[in-house]
Image (spheres, rainbow, N blue to C red):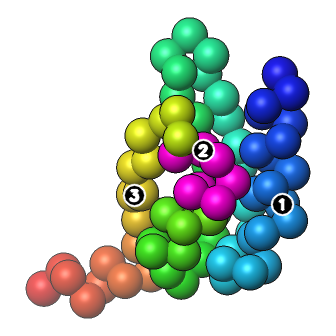
């Protein structure tokens, strides 16, 4: 438990340094050894470096998946529908 608290503290304290605008959600599945952290930022590279500095990547695989806001998708639909 202490490790998770330390990692969370490092994520919080380093977020601005790596250009993270917000940390929307933070889920941990203990049984699956999986963390899901939803961050808003302009750089996937910065997310990777933040995870390295926070210590997440020392015992977890990092997978970055770009997400698009649902409203943005709906608003852009007319561009793709002919």
Marked residue nearer the N-terminal end (2 or 1): 1
Q: Nearer the viewer, mark 3 or mark 2?
A: 2
From where the camera sits, is residue 7 visible? yes
Read off the residue under disc 3. Answer: 65
Mark 1, other Cα within 10 Å: few <14 / some 14–19 / many ≥20: some
Q: Secondary structure at mark 2?
A: helix
Quadrant housing the N terminus: top right
Task: Find residue 56 and name its label.
Answer: 2
Q: Secondary structure at mark 3?
A: loop
- The span from disc 2 to disc 1 (Cα, nearest Å) is 13 Å
Describe residue 32's horizontal placement relative to residue 27 as left or right: left
Describe residue 52's horizontal placement relative to residue 81 as left or right: right
Task: Find residue 12 and name its label.
Answer: 1
Image x and y of residue 29, in percent? 60, 21
The residue lying toward the viewer, choosing from 13 and 37, is 13
Marked residue nearer the N-terminal end (1 or 3): 1
> Residue at point 80% right, 55% down?
10
């Amino acid at each position: 438990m202490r490790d998770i608290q330390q990692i969370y503290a490092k994520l919080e304290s380093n977020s601005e340094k790596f250009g993270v605008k917000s940390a929307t959600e933070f889920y941990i599945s203990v049984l699956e050894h999986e963390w899901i952290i939803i961050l808003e930022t302009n750089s996937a590279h910065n997310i990777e470096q933040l995870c390295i500095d926070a210590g997440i990547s020392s015992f977890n695989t990092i997978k970055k998946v770009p997400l698009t806001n649902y409203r943005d998708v709906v608003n852009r639909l007319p561009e793709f529908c002919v």
